[in-house]
């Protein structure tokens, strides 16, 4: 369905009632932001946007209607009350399918929203240690890391060696191991301690919770 600018009374206002195409007036009730509005970027060429002379047409039920001229394909779509949507524009003969394109877009947007809703965004939090850290600060850093891990975030443990402190780099690995050991009930080592220039890093990730039967 190709959309054109409407009069002021028909412009998009949240729940539009009418859209104009070159051959139809379509009434849509799918609602709000899921409606294709004038100026929207579409993923497919629809109806008069298709420029091929001939197209292979698939019906709304998946039936092969064969190779038709674009004119005949548009007439077939119009007679059935559907849009002609190009689903394979790069084929030697473009493939088009009959469908309600607004409804299709609505359903695709709905699926995308559900996917985003169920998507867990994992961030990486950093906890910095020092070769000379005291017991109190060490425990404070560990509590902070535990909080991050409990929230589902990864933790990057780092330590920067300044000046001659780089000589203590090898002696700092046990400190990292002690840090990881104190969190072993909730975390696993994703990347073991390693030295990168004057910095040592280790990455901890949350342990996967076992599903209860």
Image (spheres, rainbow, N blue to C red):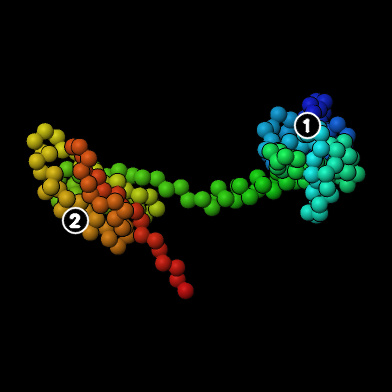
In the drawing, does residue 136 fall left or right of residue 152? left
Labels 1 and 2: the sequence-earlier one: 1
Say above or below: 66 vs 25: below
| Element assignment for label 2 | helix
Residue pictured at 85% horizontal, 42% vertical: 68
Residue 51 tag number: 1
Q: Position of residue 108 (x, y in %)?
A: 67, 47
Q: Is residue 192 above or below residue 42?
A: below
**Coordinates of residue 155 in the picture (x, y in percent):** 32, 48
Quarter residue 28 falls in: top right
What is the total number of numbered labels drawn onto the structure image? 2
Hey, which quadrant is residue 10 in on the image? Answer: top right
Tell me the residue at 47%/74% (across/down): 213
**Which residue does the numbered mark 2 point to in the structure image?**
178
| Mark 1–mark 2 distance (CA, rounded to whole Å) | 67 Å
Q: Nearer the viewer, residue 51 or 28?
A: 51
Classed neighbour count for the residue bearing mark 2: other residues with Cα under 10 Å, few (<14), some (14–19), many (≥20): few
The answer, for residue 166, to whether it is visible in the render is yes
- Observer-nearest residue: 169 or 65? 65
Tell me residue 35's x, y (percent): 73, 39
Q: Residues within 10 Å of mark 1 (few under 14, many from 20)?
A: few
Q: Helix or strand or loop: what does disc 1 sit on?
A: loop
Residue plotted at (9% across, 41% down): 167
Contact check, label 1 and label 2, Cβ < 8 Å = no
Horizontal and vertical percent position of residue 199: 21, 39
Residue at position x 40%, y 45% in the image: 123
Residue 2 in view in this figure: no
Quick one: quadrant of the N terminus?
Answer: top right
Please tell me the numbered disc located at residue 18. none
* Left or right of 75 in this view: 203: left
Residue 21 image-quadrant placement: top right
């Amino acid at each position: 369905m190709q959309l054109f600018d409407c009069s002021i009374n028909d412009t998009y206002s949240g729940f539009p009632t009418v859209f104009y195409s070159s051959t139809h007036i379509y009434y849509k009730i799918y609602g709000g932001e899921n409606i294709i509005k004038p100026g929207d970027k579409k993923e497919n060429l629809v109806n008069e946007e298709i420029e091929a002379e001939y197209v292979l047409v698939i019906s709304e039920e998946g039936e092969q209607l064969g190779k038709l001229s674009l004119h005949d394909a548009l007439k077939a779509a119009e007679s059935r009350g559907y849009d002609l949507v190009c689903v394979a524009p790069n084929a030697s003969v473009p493939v088009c399918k009959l469908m309600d394109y607004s409804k299709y877009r609505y359903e695709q947007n709905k699926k995308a929203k559900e996917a985003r809703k169920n998507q867990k965004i994992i961030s990486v939090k950093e906890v910095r240690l020092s070769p000379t850290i005291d017991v109190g600060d060490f425990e404070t850093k560990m509590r902070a890391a535990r909080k991050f891990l409990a929230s589902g975030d990864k933790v990057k443990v780092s330590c920067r060696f300044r000046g001659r402190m780089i000589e203590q780099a090898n002696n700092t690995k046990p400190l990292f191991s002690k840090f990881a050991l104190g969190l072993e009930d909730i975390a696993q080592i994703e990347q073991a301690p390693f030295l990168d220039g004057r910095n040592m890093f280790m990455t901890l990730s949350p342990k996967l919770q076992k599903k209860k039967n």
